[in-house]
Image (cartoon, rainbow, N blue to C red):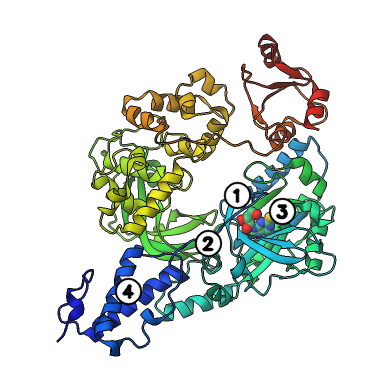
Amino acid sequence: MTDTHKNSPGNPSAGSSESPAEAARRLRAQIRRHNALYFQEDRPEIPDDAYDRLLRELEELEKAHPELAKGSPTAEVAPPPAGRALNEVIHDTPMLSLDKALSVQEILDFEDRVKRFLGSNELFGFYTMPKFDGLAVELNYDKKTLILASTRGDGRRGEDITQNVRTIDDIPKTLGPGAPEGPLFVRGEVYMEKDEFSRLNEEREEMGLSIFANPRNAAAGSLRQLDPTVTQQRNLKFFSYGLSDPKMAQAETYGELMKNLGHWGFPVEASKASKVNFNLAEALAVFRDLEAGRDSLPFEVDGLVITLNDLGLWDRLGATSRAPRYAVAAKFKPRAAKTRVLNIEIQVGRTGALTPVAFMEPVMVSGVRVAQATLHNEDELKRKDVRVGDFVILQRAGDVIPEIVEVDLEKRPVGLIPFVFPKACPICGTPSVRKEGEAVSRCPNRSCPAQIEARLIHFAHKNALDIDGLGQKVAAQLLSNNLVKLPTDLFKLTVQDLKSLPRFGEKSALKLIEGIDQARTKALWRFVNALSIRHVGERVSQVLADNFDSLAALSSATNDQLQAINDIGPEVAKSLLDFFQSPLNHHFLADLMDPALVNPTKTPPQAEGNLSDKRFVLTGTLKSMTRAEAKARVQAKGGRVLSAVSKETDYVVAGEASGSKLTNAQKLNLTILDEEAFLKLLG
Ligand code: IVH
């Protein structure tokens, strides 16, 4: 047997008895599988250089045995090797999210918020529309012709999916009569019908490919393809629901806006749920009907979007940096499923929290395969009394996070023992601590390997420094090889360091280093969130970044300075002070303040405007608008509204019955605006 391939490099899996024909078959199957993972599914399993080695091996084998070369993937046109990613598209008007209402009470709260903001007690009309469970896209038309299509991405930066969108029949490539000639940005949802989803998964199962968890993932996976012919085969559909600038709609109400979208050639949802409602009671009835009838719709919906109908009010209410104030997504109750608990494990989080996690027989809950669920803490576990071997009811809270609702006690087998919560950290053995009044037991050892790993993973998390490719596996590898001790050691890594690790090739090493380099200058709030300080999550980090210009400034803030900030209470302030004063964090903080390593970007003003970066403090009551409205209008012009007066304050807006803030402002000789001057400044 001439086994030329056997000694070739990078051929670990070839058995010694493998013939050239068998080896060729094996390699082809592997290459085809990785091609599908890489090009069709966007989730490669091996680094590029490992893939290249497989291909090279097959090529060499075929050179030695030309009779084996027929129909081989080596002869196929190579799929595009470089630029795995789609191009970036910047959304000039960010694609925002929607606030959620998880109960009827929260829908009522939404209307209350609107009333408070507008300082009005009138009844409002609403437009309701199903909340489609697909993928938000923006379509850009010029001279009535589709020129660009993009995903929402993080709201500000999406991906260019123009070529893929062109294959969707529902999406007009040119617009009908009456549509604006000038640039038009239409927003809507690309989705996959339930039947098409089942058909696709059946087909994939037959082909031995992984199945999509739900229609939403299937739509997303189909749209974010490098090869548009794949998208074309997936029968995606589209509903429009808005414009980036509603003023382009030639309409006064959202209902008219939707009608116009229909006239211009866009598909608009036309079930009984898409309609104008005289008041909120009517919208609530639509919500109940849609929830009851959701299964009879051909597509997945996960709630009802309730939006004020009057576009003039949209203007007044505006949006926070996250979501518009004039709409809410009322979500349906999660659906439940039954399964059995196979094991309960204690996981150690980045702040040392010991979290019990149940591992279960996999089960589908509203279309998603679920195999584990958090039991939150010792008390929750005790309250639900979940035991290994129990049958449990599972829900996905907000249709996302799987949750054990209760144990089916009737089905409990005899002899199951209650779970005993450990008194020590399962990883480092340090006795755990549970503070009075707290439900969480913690491992107090900040040097516990599990905590270090969890903090490193969090440092790179999407909501922190967002470093692609740094998940659990890579984090564990970096730590166990002593390449990283502190998260900031990431900024000292070289390509050479990474290449010394198993499964890292030149390309994957370069890619990770590039991701780390990009993180060096990310927004300040991301750095604050990356620190893993207790009680300091994404929202608090944003508040802190709004109030401090650098990590150095934040780290030397006093208790009083911290608590003077709205939203920062004594607990958060204490946690921050503890963190910044702890000698354990000395090196970490020194790295974070070393400009040779990182340069966090100061929080950009919320919008471009003539008040860019100006600091306001509001006090007293204004006649023409509420406090909330005033704050929003300052922010819309790029200004910042802070709660405490300091010498850094640019303007103090003093309404009627201004209190101590006004006196302080006078003492500090600050610019004080009365209502008239304030309105003038706002233009
Ligand atoms: S927005 C502001 N309408 O929800 C009022 N969003 O938009 C204009 N989504 O991820 C309506 N169905 O993909 C709107 N009928 C609908 C929607 C909808 C689904 C999604 C959208 C985005 C998020 C926020």
Residue 321: name its quadrant: top right
* Amino acid type of the residue that numbered disc 2 sits on in the rendered structure: Leu
Q: Residues within 10 Å of mark 4 (few under 14, many from 20)?
A: some
Which residue in the structure is indicated by mark 4? Answer: 55
| Location of the C terminus (image quadrant) | top right
Q: Residue at the spot x=39%, y=65% of the render?
A: 44
* Amino acid type of the residue that numbered disc 4 sits on in the rendered structure: Leu
Above or below, 56 relative to 132: below
Decide if residue 62 is in sight here.
yes
Foreground disc of the pair 3, 4: 4
Residue 147 in the image: state x and y as whole percent.
68, 64
* Amino acid type of the residue that numbered disc 1 sits on in the rendered structure: Arg
Q: Residue at the spot x=43%, y=28% of the render?
A: 575
Above or below, 286 relative to 310: below
Label annotation for residue 156: 1
Residue 278 in the image: state x and y as whole percent.
82, 53
Which residue in the structure is indicated by mark 2? Answer: 86
User: Which label's residue is closer to the chain start, 2 or 4?
Assistant: 4
Helix, strand or loop at mark 2: loop
Label annotation for residue 510: none
For the residues bearing labels 4 and 1, Cβ distance under 8 angstroms: no
Helix, strand or loop at mark 1: loop
Which residue in the structure is indicated by mark 3? Answer: 244
Q: Is residue 83 left or right of residue 494?
A: right
| Closest to the observer, 372 or 590 | 590
